[in-house]
Amino acid sequence: MGYRALTGTLFSILQTAQASSGNLEQGGWKYSDFLSVTLTALGLMLGVLAIGLAVAGVFGYRAVIDMASRKAEEAALKRLSEYFEG
């Protein structure tokens, strides 16, 4: 969810508010209502982004640990073979 998703959400909220009242302040929606919905949508998007980053971090951490383990094993085997061969 990037900049486009946020822009699209805000645009659709604004269109809904204008369609229901003609103007934000004159009809059923007050500015505080619009701001509340907008900030709630932003909070939800940031929450989803945080969860996605956490999942990516867990998988990235596991990949780094696995790669480090393989490289350490390769380096140890190389050193042992050099030690016993020469």
Image: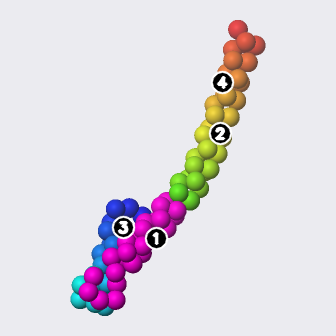
Callout 1 touching callout 4 (CB < 8 Å):
no
Identify the secondary structure beneath mark 1: helix
Amino acid type, label 1:
Thr
Q: CA distance from mark 2 to mark 4?
A: 15 Å
* Mark 1 vs mark 4: in front: 1
* Mark 2 vs mark 4: in front: 2
Name of the residue lying farthest toward the right? 84
Q: Earlier in the sequence, mark 1 or mark 2?
A: 1
Residue marked by disc 2: 65
- Residue range of the region highlighted in magenta in the rendering: 25-49
Is residue 39 within the magenta segment? yes
Location of residue 33 (image quadrant): bottom left
Q: Mark number for residue 40?
A: 1
Residue 69 located left or right of residue 53 = right
Magenta region, mostly helix, strand or loop? helix
Amino acid type, label 2:
Ile
* Mark 1 vs mark 2: in front: 1
Q: CA distance from mark 4 to mark 3?
A: 48 Å
Identify the secondary structure beneath mark 4: helix
Q: Earlier in the sequence, mark 4 or mark 3?
A: 3
Q: Nearer the viewer, residue 33 or 19?
A: 33
Residue 22 located left or right of residue 50 = left
Q: Mark number for residue 75?
A: 4
Quadrant of the snapshot with the N terminus: bottom left
Callout 1 touching callout 3 (CB < 8 Å):
no
Callout 4 touching callout 3 (CB < 8 Å):
no
